[in-house]
Image: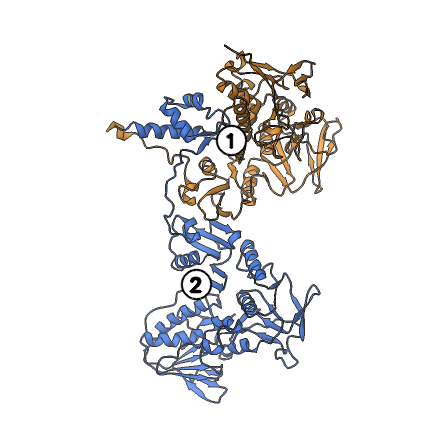
Chain colours: A blue, B orange
């Protein structure tokens, strides 16, 4: 592979945008063409919720222009790949030749099988919208909104719409939002945050029918829903690859060089299935873009799946998930609960390595743990300080009791009492018992008394 | 010149009654008081906390608290098998069952408590026992036979000790606890899960979240079986009730003394009843309405009252230590301070090691600096250190404290320096 091949990229989402930028950085000198189906330049989909809450406009999300020499065709959809001739046909009637083709077709929202959600011709009923594109975000109807699906997108969407002053109900089939990522404690905390932000929650509920302005739930409740936002997951966009005869399971199957079954065709991002996984996660897409840029620029390398953190950030809410919710191989579990301040951490360790974690309201710990997790580094021994976000070593590391500490609880004898008795000549348990009564109750303190005696004797007999 | 000593009458010779007299005698340098101790049991006070060791071979004499000095003290008169039947506050006298009337200048009620036996049908059948005195244990030992089926009613601290006692007597007992977990007062769910696994390993069979509905007789008229409220039927030839205690406050009504909402002689935080001559200490005392079923708070009360009688400086009874550790071979479970994180703004820090089978929870102040309490299960090595640190600033990071061997740090190094 040489650095002068023509690279054709189908799709212009964040993965494609990052790829073409990094191609140049890694020394690729050949022509690069990008075909974007949306009529606008690449934008940062991750920030779409900021359009919903009104802090940004769709235009603000635009990503920087691609490097010089990269030709971008917006509003052009690829319709077929002719692998034998190495060219791509489009809905504009043009054809584009390639030496290397990159499929970055992304994913599309999954539309639930719900009566009334589609019109007879298969389009979404008026009032119903998905939230994948900038157009979607601008299309959301006014009035009370029901968000269907309480995953990451549904949760972020709910919070964003509440910030915009909308009336929002979140309907989620699980026991609490993000239930596939959060344990009960963290889930309850998230639910209470959503409620205190003003959301109505309907958890453990499914929608059964949409009528204009109304959503009917499986328990018969009818919610007012001038707008229905579908946040019910995504499906990799694989139609083009399938028609081209490339191997597709859930996503377009790629190897560790992010290569499909055709060595001249690569895939990355939300449309690609690597090692049996379709992460659907922008962090993964960016890592893949970096690897693929090196590969296409001719470097002898391959992609190693990283371990990105899932972060959900909204004013007053900072949530991070590392690894799977119940990580295999985890032997030790550490939790920190601070319900009064809405903070929670659940950390699973495999030896001294992070196997998984969920953190709410602990941004410093989240950042530190994400680093350790990504690089598989050992967790420092003061885990409490790490989780609280305090500097390690803030507390002195002495396991020594103050003199006023009570050692014999039955008889209320302090360490100072023992030392006084020692100075008065008591040198063994019998002497101590006679002088202080320590050890004469339940007897449980005998070892401690011996230790204090030994350390007093040891400390005072030095020359 | 010596004055005639005033008379202190102590009703009850349990651990707290005994401690009160001992403390009084130790600090009464001028012989201001003569103590008359009226014991219900036929023997002097003994270490009830260590009662279970009686079944493991320690004798009654090993557990007695009254030494020679106490028994021969001219200013102490101990009358055993002398239960008090009435108090005449106007005459300032008490009457014992044999009709003897004793005058007092100060009266301390240290009557303790009795086991609570829930009102279930069959509870009076032969084969039903309680677990509080030497006599109870003697009766239990007499009835126990290797392999007999047994049921312990109550999965608290004492219930588990009773269950272990049955185990030592060759009985493999069922433990029935009304709450959803064992030791519900002391432990949280995580700690109780470890405890359940450990005691199950010892052969106990645990039934939580259910209660005894009825005890059925066998053909011989003794206990034959138990039905639980969840419908479970258990074979049982022995039933031990260990479902908590109730204060012995039956002297209160006839004497016109007030009792707390949940029983016990109502006293202020100096352990005094509304009658300035009458005090109450230990499990029978409802200090500002609250009773305490542990020996450490009882001792505090006893010393407090003895000090008051001697006009020694005393602090009111406050923040009692309610720490508890289960004393069963191979079962390390303990709880101390605010174990359930009920104090304002408390943080909970939990370490669970599934490989080692351990669980540890620390409850801390909102800043994470001051230890307020905790639960340890599977490994309670750190118990004594943490208990002593309760209410104080941590001296080391929690992770280190939980792995430390005990107060004073690791065992002291050999004294090589001295030799050098």
Is residue B98 shown left or right of residue A456?
A: right
Is residue A153 shown left or right of residue A227?
A: left
Q: Position of residue B378 (x, y in %)?
A: 50, 39
Q: Is residue B57 visible to the viewer in this orientation of the structure? A: no
The residue pinned by badge 2 equals A308
Q: Which quadrant holds the N terminus of chain A? A: bottom left
Q: Secondary structure at mark 1?
A: loop
Camera-near label (1 vs 2) is 1
Give the label on residue B251, or none. none
The residue drawn where x is 47% and y is 56% is A357
The residue drawn where x is 60% and y is 76% is A141
Relative to the observer, which residue lies in front, B28 or A152?
Answer: B28
Q: The residue marked by circle 1 belongs to what chain?
A: B
The residue drawn where x is 38% and y is 59% is A375
Q: The residue marked by circle 2 belongs to what chain?
A: A
The residue pinned by badge 1 equals B315
Q: Position of residue A44 (x, y in %)?
A: 45, 74
Relative to the observer, which residue lies in front, A328 or B30?
Answer: B30
Q: Position of residue A110 (x, y in %)?
A: 57, 72
Q: Toward which corner of the image does residue B13 lie, by quadrant?
A: top right
Q: Which quadrant holds the C terminus of chain A? A: top left
Q: Is residue B420 above or below residue A45?
A: above
Q: Position of residue A366 (x, y in %)?
A: 44, 58
Q: Is residue B112 visible to the viewer in this orientation of the structure? A: yes
């Amino acid at each position: 592979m040489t650095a002068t091949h023509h690279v054709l990229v189908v799709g212009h989402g964040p993965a494609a945008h990052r790829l073409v930028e990094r191609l140049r950085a890694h020394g690729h000198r050949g022509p690069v063409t990008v075909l974007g189906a949306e009529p606008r330049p690449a934008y940062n989909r991750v920030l779409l919720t900021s359009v919903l809450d009104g802090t940004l406009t769709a235009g603000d999300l635009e990503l920087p222009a691609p490097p010089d020499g990269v030709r971008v065709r917006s509003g052009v959809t690829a319709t077929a790949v002719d692998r034998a001739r190495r060219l791509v046909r489009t809905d504009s009637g043009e054809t584009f030749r390639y030496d290397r083709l990159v499929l970055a077709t992304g994913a599309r929202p999954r539309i639930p099988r719900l009566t009334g959600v589609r019109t007879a011709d298969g389009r979404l009923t008026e009032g119903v919208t998905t939230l994948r594109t900038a157009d979607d975000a601008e299309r959301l109807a006014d009035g009370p909104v029901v968000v269907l699906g309480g995953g990451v997108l549904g949760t972020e969407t709910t919070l964003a719409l509440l910030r915009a002053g909308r009336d929002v109900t979140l309907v989620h089939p699980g026991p609490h939002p993000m239930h596939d990522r959060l344990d009960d404690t963290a889930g309850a905390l998230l639910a209470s945050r959503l409620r205190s932000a003003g959301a109505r929650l309907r958890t453990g509920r499914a929608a059964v029918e949409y009528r204009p302005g109304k959503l009917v739930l499986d328990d018969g409740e009818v919610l007012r829903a001038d707008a229905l936002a579908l946040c019910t997951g995504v499906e990799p966009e694989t139609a083009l690859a399938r028609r081209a005869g490339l191997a597709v399971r859930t996503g377009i199957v790629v190897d560790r060089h992010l290569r499909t079954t055709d060595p001249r065709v690569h895939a990355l991002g939300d449309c690609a299935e690597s090692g049996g996984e379709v992460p659907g996660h922008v962090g993964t897409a960016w890592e893949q873009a970096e690897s693929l840029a090196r590969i296409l620029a001719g470097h002898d390398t391959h992609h190693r799946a990283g371990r990105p953190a899932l972060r959900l950030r909204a004013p007053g809410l900072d949530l991070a998930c590392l690894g799977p919710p119940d990580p295999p191989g985890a032997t030790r579990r550490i939790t920190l609960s601070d319900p009064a301040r809405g903070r929670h951490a659940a950390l699973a360790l495999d030896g001294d390595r992070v196997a998984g974690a969920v953190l709410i309201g602990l941004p410093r710990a989240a950042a530190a743990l994400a680093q350790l997790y990504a690089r598989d580094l050992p967790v420092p021994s003061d885990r409490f300080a790490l989780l609280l976000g305090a500097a390690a070593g803030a507390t002195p590391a002495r396991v020594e009791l103050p003199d006023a500490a009570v050692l014999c609880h039955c008889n209320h004898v302090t360490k100072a009492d023992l030392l006084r008795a020692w100075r008065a000549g008591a040198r063994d348990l019998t002497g101590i018992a006679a002088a202080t009564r320590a050890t004469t109750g339940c007897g449980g303190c005998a070892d401690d008394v011996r230790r204090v005696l030994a350390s007093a004797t040891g400390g005072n007999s030095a020359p | 010149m010596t004055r005639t000593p005033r008379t202190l009458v102590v009703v009850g010779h349990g651990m707290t009654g005994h401690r009160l007299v001992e403390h009084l005698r130790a600090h009464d340098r001028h012989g201001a008081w003569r103590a008359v101790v009226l014991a219900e049991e036929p023997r002097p006070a003994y270490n009830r906390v260590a009662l279970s060791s009686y079944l493991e071979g320690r004798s009654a004499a090993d557990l007695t608290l009254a030494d020679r000095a106490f028994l021969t003290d001219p200013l102490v008169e101990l009358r055993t098998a002398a239960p008090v039947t009435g108090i005449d506050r106007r005459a300032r006298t008490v009457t014992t069952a044999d009709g003897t009337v004793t005058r007092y200048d100060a009266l301390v009620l240290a009557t303790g408590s009795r086991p609570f036996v829930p009102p279930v049908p069959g509870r009076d059948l032969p084969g039903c026992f309680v677990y509080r005195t030497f006599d109870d244990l003697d009766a239990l030992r007499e009835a126990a036979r290797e392999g007999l089926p047994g049921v312990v009613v109550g999965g608290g601290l004492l219930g588990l000790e009773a269950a272990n006692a049955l185990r030592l007597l060759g009985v493999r007992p069922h433990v029935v606890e009304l709450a959803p977990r064992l030791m519900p007062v002391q432990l949280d769910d995580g700690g109780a899960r470890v405890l359940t696994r450990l005691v199950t390993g010892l052969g106990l069979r645990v039934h939580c979240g259910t209660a005894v509905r009825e005890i059925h007789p066998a053909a011989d008229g003794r206990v034959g079986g138990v039905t639980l409220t969840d419908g479970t039927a258990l074979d049982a030839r022995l039933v031990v009730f260990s479902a908590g205690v109730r204060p012995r406050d039956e002297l209160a009504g006839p004497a016109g003394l007030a009792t707390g909402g949940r029983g016990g002689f109502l006293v202020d935080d100096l352990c005094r009843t509304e009658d300035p001559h009458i005090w109450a200490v230990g499990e029978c005392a409802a200090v500002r309405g609250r009773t305490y079923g542990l020996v450490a708070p009882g001792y505090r009360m006893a010393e407090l009252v003895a000090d008051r009688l001697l006009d020694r400086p005393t602090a009111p009874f406050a923040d009692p230590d309610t720490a508890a550790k289960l004393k069963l071979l191979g079962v390390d479970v303990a709880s101390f301070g605010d174990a359930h994180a009920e104090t304002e703004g408390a943080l909970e820090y939990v370490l669970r090691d599934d490989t080692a089978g351990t669980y540890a929870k620390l409850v801390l102040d909102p800043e994470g600096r001051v230890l307020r309490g905790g639960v340890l299960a599977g490994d309670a090595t750190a118990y004594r250190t943490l208990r002593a640190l309760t209410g104080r600033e941590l001296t080391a990071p929690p992770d280190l404290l939980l792995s430390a061997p005990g107060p004073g740090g690791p065992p002291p190094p050999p004294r090589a320096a001295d030799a050098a």
